[in-house]
Image (cartoon, helix red, strand yellow):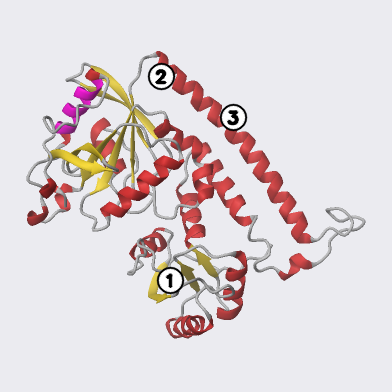
Amino acid sequence: MTNLQPPDRQSAPTILVGVDFGLANFDGELEELGLLAQTAGLNPVARMTCKRKAPDAALFVGSGKADEIKLLAAQLGAVEVLFDQSLSPAQQRNLERHLELPVNDRTLLILEIFGQRARSHEGKLQVELARMQYLSTRLVRRWSHLERQSGGIGMRGGPGESQIELDRRMIGENIKKIKERLIKVKRQRQTQRRQRERRDAFNISLVGYTNAGKSTLFNALVKARAYAADQLFATLDTTTRQLYLGEAGRSVSLSDTVGFIRDLPHGLIDAFQATLQEAVDADLLLHVVDAASPHFLEQMAEVQRVLGEIGAADIPQLLIFNKLDALENERRPLQLEDTFDLNGVQTPRLFLSAKNGEGLQALRQQLARIVSGGVLPEKDGEDFPENPEAAP
């Protein structure tokens, strides 16, 4: 199967393209796509945006804008074009023929990053499943050889079976095998969870937008060495450790999960169901927010949306506004503990810096109170006086 890709994508000059359809979450600066590209090892050399009422059926951006992209790519020596939105197989094929360059979208980019970062057996299986599901819709996009008939004596496939039909059947078989293996992994996780339940364990899961600092906070709390870096999707595989809370006189189970992101491919949500199950089965979610991000409200909304999709929307949350050290003095909160309106519910919030440790002791004390009482504290303002001015 021939793939129209540059020989070496590491540091490959890439043009980023985004189309504004009037949606509220449009990233006009293509900042997040640029970070994703850099995380994947690409080198964004130009960013181009345009406005449209609806996607062009053939070229997504229209022929005029496609000509502009082609000219810019030739001037800058770009070897790939990356779109911030998902492209249909036909749009991707047409764009590649028009631009004479490889064209990929945000979905494939996220899949590639996940493929690079997955370390555990389960994580690799989940990424491979999502990749296979994505490829199953792309078999018609580039390969003219797939139109040839390959059936006959001594050939793989039945008489008259085209290469595209054979490839689709092979991918379907691989998807079936991977799903069967993931079922076994899920059973193992369920056994481990039952063992924790028998020990009367209190389960806490860290959730949040990617690069909010979940792994840094996890390491600071349990003195672990989980990989943490200032990049998107630094952590893919769920890590669970015991956290001892001296004030409560007991330990709790703390899990670090994969970060969420806008337009996370649905195939990945399905494929990572076993990993995200840690969040579904938690007694408490520590929702980590990048307090220094100008887009923290949109990021929180995306996390809430994904939690709803995986069935974890009703689990109690404790908001952790991280990266206090990155806030300018005029944006620092007047109080480090208050409440925040989360979907109409006043939810307790703590400001802290997982990087330098500020506020960590307050978090430990609050977790001890929650664990000792078995429920979240009353949100009547007595323990967490609401302070609207504290929001960054």
Residue 220, percent across and down?
Answer: 23, 36
Give the residue type that dot 3 points to: Lys
Asked if the residue at tag 1 contacts the one at tag 3, i.e. Cβ–Cβ closer than 8 Å, the answer is: no
SS at mark 3 in the image: helix
Q: Is residue 288 left or right of residue 6?
A: left
Give the residue type that dot 2 points to: Arg
What residue is pinned by disc 1? 19
**Front in this rendered view, residue 191 or 26:** 26
Q: Residue at x 52, y 37 (%)?
A: 122
User: Which portion, as a residue range, is magenta?
Assistant: 361-371
**Front in this rendered view, residue 300 or 230:** 300
Q: Residue at x 84, y 61 (%)?
A: 150
Q: Nearer the viewer, mark 1 or mark 2?
A: 1
Is 364 one of the magenta-colored residues?
Answer: yes
Alpha-carbon span between mark 1 and mark 2: 47 Å
Residue 204, percent across and down?
Answer: 32, 29
Image vertical order of residue 332 relative to residue 144, above or below: above
Image mark count: 3
What residue is pinned by disc 3? 184
Say few, some or many: other residues with alpha carbon within 10 Å of mark 1 (under 14 / 14 to 19 / 20 or more): many
- Say which quarter of the image contains residue 140: bottom right
Q: Closer to the N terminus: mark 3 or mark 1?
A: 1
